[in-house]
Image: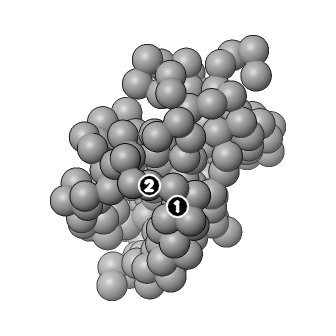
Amino acid sequence: MTEFHEPRGDEPGYGSTLPTIYSVVYCSRASADIDEAEVQRIVTKSQVWNARHQITGLLVFGSGIFFQWLEGPREEVTDLVALLRTDRRHGGIIVLGEVEEVRERLFPEWGMERVGGEHIREVLEDALGNATDSKNEQALKQLLTQLDSPALSGLSGLSAAA
């Protein structure tokens, strides 16, 4: 397991009390056999696995599309993304963004939280309204912009009018 540590020398985050967080945002097409029960099994299993690997985030599922935000230690998150790329339940992962920076976690209490497509804009806007870290504000604004991208057009309730 990767341990958080105080960066030294020229490492990112030197002199900061905040951890270096690596984040990946992606979307993928769900395989045809994915239903609500399977999504719930994914969330339940992910909560346990992510807690062991210091990963937090959220999962949105709607209209056959997964949209996910993952954050944690770089090695743990990249290993998870590599695992997801081999998962038969995903059809083509599109990485919308990835960044490593010293900041607070966006979803510190969410080992993996499922958010319905109709509520994702509300959740992100609420997080933006409560953000105290300028890097988190920037990341949330970027996510809100990405909700209107063609890659996410299949998620229900994500239009700007929602």
Question: Do the CB atoms of the residues marked 2 and 1 lie less than 8 Å apart?
Answer: yes
Where in the figure is residue 34, as x and y percent of width and height? 44, 55
Q: Relative to 50, is 20 above or below?
A: above
Q: Which sits in the foreground, 9 or 36?
A: 36
Label 2: state its secondary structure: loop
Q: Is residue 105 left or right of residue 77?
A: right
Q: Specify the label residue 127 is tagged with.
A: none
Q: Which sits in the foreground, 150 or 15?
A: 150
Q: Is residue 53 left or right of residue 81?
A: right
Q: Residue at x 50, y 22 (%)?
A: 153
Q: Residue at x 50, y 27 (%)?
A: 154
Where in the figure is residue 44, as x and y percent of width and height? 55, 75
Q: Which sits in the foreground, 110 or 15?
A: 110
Q: Amino acid at mark 2?
A: Ile
Label 1 environment density (alpha carbons within 10 Å; few <14, some 14–19, many ≥20) = some
Residue 140: quadrant of the picture: top right
